[in-house]
Image (cartoon, rainbow, N blue to C red):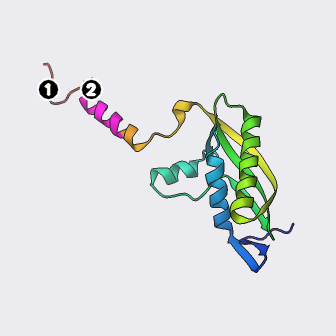
Amino acid sequence: MLPTNKESQVAQELGLLTVNRKVVKAVIHRIASDVPGVVQLGGDSIWKRLFKFLNWKLGPRGIELELADGEAAMTLTLVVRMGSRVPEIAAEVRRRVKKALKEQLGIDVRTVNVNITSVKVAGDEPRQIEDLDATATRDITRKRRFDFDDEAPL
């Protein structure tokens, strides 16, 4: 299998189907992220935190992909939930990714290597917007230790 950088061509009955690398990565990212026990693809890095702070959108992370004519090989970098059974998660990710790429894009998967870079406790996961709104409301109604509207005792 000779890797190309941009696309995979799949021979079909009436011609060639050309699938862009971004499409393959998007499918892999969606499928792998849906596996129970997977918190995120790609590890935490200073760059990822900086992009989140600046509200810049990141593309799919944690996927090293090699494409050739109708075949793919990849290495997925995952962060899993603490207490999960890592071998079972890796096997499920492999199974789902192989099945999805074959059914959705017609691409055969040769290998799916899985690297686990970190584990996270359930409470370490990113909060949803609703949770942040609830926290902000609680902070406003909570009695503060120092209230500068009161006069300071002399």
Quadrant location of the N terminus in the rendered image? bottom right
**Residue under the point 57% across and 48% down:** 46
- Residue 109 shown in magenta: no
Residue 67 x %, y %: 77, 66
Give the residue drawn at x 80%, y 61%. 108
Direction right: furthest residue: 1
Q: Residues within 10 Å of mark 2 (few under 14, many from 20)?
A: few
Q: Which residues are magenta?
A: 133-141
Quadrant for the C terminus, please.
Answer: top left
Instruction: Look at the image and tell me whether residue 42 can be seen.
Output: no
For residue 83, which quarter of the picture? Answer: top right
Residue 137 x, y percent position in the rendering: 29, 35
**x then y, percent, for residue 134:** 34, 35
What residue is drawn where x is 51% and y is 54%? 51
Mark 2 = which residue?
Answer: 142
Q: Amino acid at mark 2?
A: Arg
- Residue lying at 76% horizontally and 80% vertically, measured from the top left: 14
Residue that carries the numbered disc 1 in the rendered image? 150
Residue 78 appearing in the image:
yes
Q: Nearer the viewer, residue 138 or 144?
A: 138
Relative to 129, is 82 above or below? Answer: above
Give the image location of residue 117, x and y in percent: 69, 41
Q: Hey, what amino acid is under mark 1?
A: Asp
Per the rendering, the mark at residue 96 is: none
**Disc 1 element:** loop
